[in-house]
Amino acid sequence: MLADKREYKKQIISSKDSFGKIFQITQQLNLRNEKEIFIQTVEILESIMENQSVALYMISSTQQFGRLVASSRRAAVSLPASIRLDDYRDALKTVKSGGVFVNTQLLEGYPALMAGLVKNEEIRMLVMLRQAKFEQMSLYYMNLFQVLCGLVSSALNHAIDYQEAQQQKSYLPGTRILNAERFAQEQKMHDLMDDRKIAKHILLKIENDGRSVQEMDYLLCGKLRENDVIGIGNDGCLYVILAQASQESLPIILRRLQQAGISGEEVCAQNIA
């Protein structure tokens, strides 16, 4: 009992010292580009929640799937690159209403804590703590997590809106293929996230075999996921950033492309500068 009181006192003192800093940091998020916002959000949650299993999943427009956009270094290896929202059915009602789901029933496959970024009654992003210590399943930590998610929500919404707007402006006419300038920015941020070990990717060079960008767009978009990025490199060639792809999954991806008559090979980012 005495230990609990000491812990509670420590939490109160810590909260008074840190919430000003939290607010200051989260306000600065709005000044950063979208990928950096994802990175900084993970780091803020890790620091304040004292938890190294943070995961951010961007939700598809169909509200069926989520794609991992950033995560804690320690959790990156074990986290799935994509999730099905149906697998979290017992949590979604709470999340959609603006609450925090806490896995007190130890449901298999569910994160310890989960909150959502909701707009127009649709989930845009899920914010998860995949694992948590027993004491982090308390009401205090649930409220702290909810406050933090609320503070970063403005920046995350800004990041998603900006990303969607920039991509629409940066696509080559009639395609989902980014121009060279925007693609270089995407590659730079994916490299940064790779370096910090909070996300991973594979860069593919695609052979167009004399086909137009519109033809390549049609062929590629049916074989890639929503968060994969297609673009023109500074060398004028066509490339794909396979977000959250691993060396284990690469042969499967290449086979899928080959079945559509597309040849690709893994390359280093330095080769397209």
Image (cartoon, grey):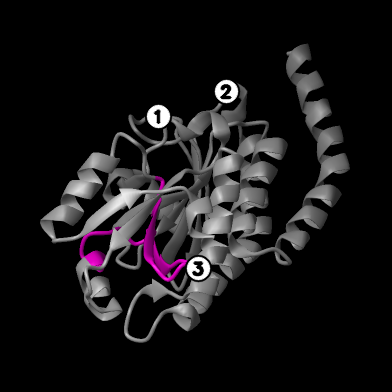
Mark 2 residue type = Lys
Residue 37 sits in quarter: bottom right
Q: Confirm whether residue 146 shows in the render.
A: no
Q: Is residue 186 left or right of residue 204?
A: right
Of pointers 1 and 3, the one earlier in the residue sequence? 1
Quick one: quadrant of the N terminus? top right
Q: Quadrant of the C terminus?
A: bottom right
What residue is disc 3 on? 234
Nearest to viewer (mark 1 / mark 3): 3
Does the magenta run of residues contain 216? no
Question: What label does residue 133 carry, if any?
Answer: 2
Given residues 173 and 262, the one toward you in this image is: 262
User: CA–CA distance between discs 2 and 1?
Assistant: 14 Å
Residue at image point 53% right, 76% down = 166
> Marks 2 and 3: CB-CB under 8 Å?
no
| Magenta-highlighted residues | 220-244
- Closer to us: mark 2 or mark 3? 3
Residue at the spot 64% in from the left edge and 56% down from the top edge: 36
Q: Which mark is residue 218?
A: none
Q: Which residue lies furthest to the top in this view?
A: 2
In the rendered structure, the answer to whether residue 140 lies left or right of residue 237 reads right
**Which element is circle 2 on?**
loop
From the top left corner, tell me how far across and down residue 156 is, in percent. Answer: 59, 62
Q: In which quarter of the view is residue 25 placed?
A: bottom right
Q: Residue at x 71, y 66 (%)?
A: 30
- Kindly identify which residue carries mark 1: 105
